[in-house]
Amino acid sequence: MNHLEQHERTTASGRPIPPRAAFYVLASIVVSFLAASSAPTPLYATYQAEWGFTPITTTVVFGVYAIAVLSGLLVFGKLSDHVGRRPVLITAIATQAAAMLLFSAAGGVDALLVARIVQGLSTGAALGAVGAAMMDINRPRGTVANAFAPGLGTATGSLISGFVVQYLPAPTHAIYLGLLAVFVAQAIAITLIDETVTREPGALASLVPEIKLPRTVRGSVLAVAPVIFAVWALAGFYGSLGPALVRTLVGSTSAVYGGLGLFVLAIVAATSVLALSKTQATTVMYTGIAALITGVALTLLAVGLDAPTLFFVGTAVAGLGFGSGFQGGIRTVLPLTEPHESSGVLSLLFVVSYLGMGVPSVIAGVLVVHGGGLVPTSEEYGAVVIALALLALAALLLRGRPHPAPGLTVASGPAVTGFQAADAEPGERVS
């Protein structure tokens, strides 16, 4: 029995949530998990004022989360290919809900670090499984959603958290308890959808961290990895040092400003995924690199001129670079994978992402305290991101356009590059 036959059999089992609705439930999990990951960003100033820590601590908290996500991806990234998507997702959502309780009860840096680790592990476990499950249901839409949903989640989490901190009582509790309610609802919903893969032996062996690329995608992953690393390094900057830098530029202590930079970056990134969904993937990546270099250059100019308006313009352009670079990489690689490879390959792409997000930001935190301070470190960080983008451009030019492996057919055309495929049923031919 092949994958599509298995899926058609399971979707006929009569669970209350049909495949089309299940797809959106799965996409909402990516949004909520990434929203939860960015929710603490506007709160760092509050934590710093209450607990008296330095910018190094802020970036360490941020970096610990990235390391935890990496660990979750490496250990649990392929597990759903063997035990099924639903068990992994239900466990990950339950763990994420526990992290929200830890955040809400946190009374110091140690508790905050523990909450970040638990949150990161559950996010790493979920990302590969939920992304692969969306592709199981509808491969074309799933490919686009895997690029769109992370940006939307990051944007909404940072902005909503900023408003909660600014205008609602008990902000260090309210935002996490609200997310907890969302996760409870999503866990219930996951129990009501069908499994999308056939279980295969080897679950325990899949827990051994292993960087293994199927031959069909090896060249493509090597070509897009520098782009993905560069754009997520920028996201790491806005998630760690961005709030303090924005408040310095606008001369305000408002928590809304603390999350506004990350919001602008992420919402433009998410929008660009839809806007460019019909554009050829390699062209999207080149667009992303150009926008990334231009946007970061504008933000560096804005920092030098102390011009907050120009800073947000540069951030928006950089957001186009973030969204385009990330979706170009996703759309280049994932259509080349077999269903049983999707979870592992997607997890590997997220490993590259979180390495880019975590490592440079922690180094930047050290430089803020022991180097030249916030503004000079921000300028140096921006220069490094531009250098990474140029390296990514060189890698793409040297490798040329990634191609599917011989014998592997990848569907093409407008219907497979965007949400136009929304009405296609699982197993239905889309062309």
Image (cartoon, rainbow, N blue to C red):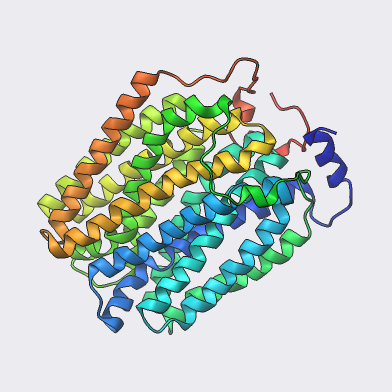
Q: Quadrant of the C terminus?
A: top right
Q: Nearer the viewer, residue 325 or 164?
A: 325
Q: Nearer the viewer, residue 279 or 329?
A: 329
**Is 97 positioned to the left or the right of 429 in the image?**
left
Q: Is residue 34 above or below residue 295?
A: below
Q: Is residue 390 above or below residue 171?
A: above
Q: Residue 213: x and y, percent?
A: 54, 33
**Is 161 positioned to the left or the right of 420 in the image?**
left
Q: Residue 122: x and y, percent?
A: 56, 61
**Is 180 positioned to the left or the right of 386 in the image?**
right
x 75%, y 27%: residue: 429
Q: Residue 21: x and y, percent?
A: 73, 51
Q: Nearer the viewer, residue 1 or 231?
A: 1
Q: Do we see residue 267 in this rendering?
A: yes
x 28%, y 31%: residue: 391
Q: Is residue 324 above or below residue 304?
A: above
Q: Quadrant of the N terminus?
A: top right
x 68%, y 68%: residue: 185
Q: Do we see residue 257 in this rendering?
A: no
